[in-house]
Amino acid sequence: MQFKSEFLQKLSSAKKIVFFTGAGISAESGISTFRGKDGIWNKMKPEELANFDAFMRNPDLVWEWYQHRRDIVHKAQPNAGHIAIAELEKYFDVTVVTQNIDNLHRRAGSKKIFELHGNIERNYCVECHTFYNLPDIELTHSAPKCKNCGGLVRPDVVWFGEMLPEDQFSGGEKAAEWSDICFVVGTSAVVYPAAYIPLAAKRAGSYIVEVNIEPTDLTQFADYSIFGKAGEVLPKILNEVKSSKIQSPG
Ligand code: BJW
């Protein structure tokens, strides 16, 4: 794979790098994306599962769906894309801003991570907000009840119509605005306000590099679009960095 020379120049002078990631980066780990022909929303209705009213109407159904996805996530392993991002920390100040709830960036070794849509390992009581992290909660097939107040315990993920965690969004936005390069990897970039982050980076002067298997809503704003699988493209970028650092150490 031959990269554009302008991109290689940017890479050689960059200090701060952000990876804004979505479901596509975990596709090669066997976790389904949301949209597109194999996406989750093709088989399930988001309005029946990924919103608070749906949970209150049918907590066991929604809990069971997350329980099924937890099983998939637990069996999944970080792939070459996650690992390349973690390894790039040896060469740059790297921040990961992810829409994913699957923990695979952390398991790959990335240190600085902002999670915009929560984390499937955490749960909390809808009444008293007591947190239940795995493995402190019994993973039953029906929605568990809070040990303090008896309220329903829900996954700590962001459903449609809910606010994103303020500290995660503002931290991710700032990192993107301060970045020299903002990679946008494996996201359709249609879900807001998360999708504002690469646009904020662009407005602040960062160089936007998209990595996706197909064009998206963001392609028109990207300085460079690399069409290919994240698990193949990102290790090649890492190799470019390694060889240029060997040729010009320091
Ligand atoms: C590969 C690959 C490979 C495949 N390599 N690439 C402003 C404008 C318009 C709409 C709104 C707006 N503000 C709010 C809205 C409404 C709504 C929204 O954005 N709707 C749009 C869909 C129209 N947003 C919200 O409701 C948000 N909250 C909010 O705005 O609060 C303020 C508010 C409060 C009260 C009233 C009103 C407003 C919350 C959004 C929460 C999103 N939650 C989910 C579920 C999380 C929990 C769970 O997982 O169950 O988050 S939805 C789902 O979409 C999930 C994802 O994080 C998110 C983004 O999806 P992503 O990651 O981009 O995946 P895909 O499948 O879309 O794309 C995968 C990509 O990978 C594709 O491009 C492939 O080509 C690519 N790919 N394999 C590289 N190997």
Image (tube, rainbow, N blue to C red):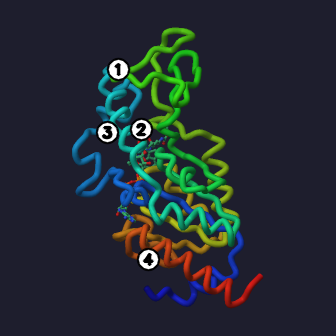
Q: Mark 4 or mark 3: which comes first in sequence? A: 3
Q: Position of residue 134 (x, y in %)?
A: 52, 31
- How far is the residue under mark 4 from the one under mark 3? 30 Å
Residue nearer the viewer, 176 or 211: 211
Q: Mark 2 or mark 3: which comes first in sequence? A: 3
Mark 4 = which residue? 226
Q: Secondary structure at mark 3?
A: helix
- How far is the residue under mark 1 from the one under mark 3? 19 Å
Give the amino acid type for the residue marked by disc 4 in the picture.
Answer: Ile
- How far is the residue under mark 4 from the one under mark 2? 30 Å
Question: Disc 4 or disc 3, which is closer to the eye?
Answer: 4
Q: Mark 4 or mark 2: which comes first in sequence? A: 2
Query: Which label number is shown at residue 46?
Result: 3
Marker count (numbered): 4
Mark 2 = which residue? 160
**Who's the residue at 34% across and 27% down the image?**
54
Q: Is residue 241 above or below residue 106?
A: below
- How far is the residue under mark 4 from the one under mark 1? 43 Å
Give the amino acid type for the residue marked by disc 3 in the picture.
Answer: Pro
Q: Mark 2 or mark 1: which comes first in sequence? A: 1
Q: Secondary structure at mark 1?
A: loop
For residue 200, side relative to residue 187 (left or right):
right
Kindly indicate whether the residue at mark 3 contacts the one at mark 2 (C-beta within 8 angstroms): yes
Q: Mark 4 or mark 1: which comes first in sequence? A: 1
Q: Quadrant of residue 173?
A: bottom right
* Quadrant holding the N terminus: bottom left
Q: Quadrant of residue 91?
A: bottom right
Question: Disc 2 or disc 1, which is closer to the eye?
Answer: 1
- How far is the residue under mark 2 from the one under mark 1? 22 Å
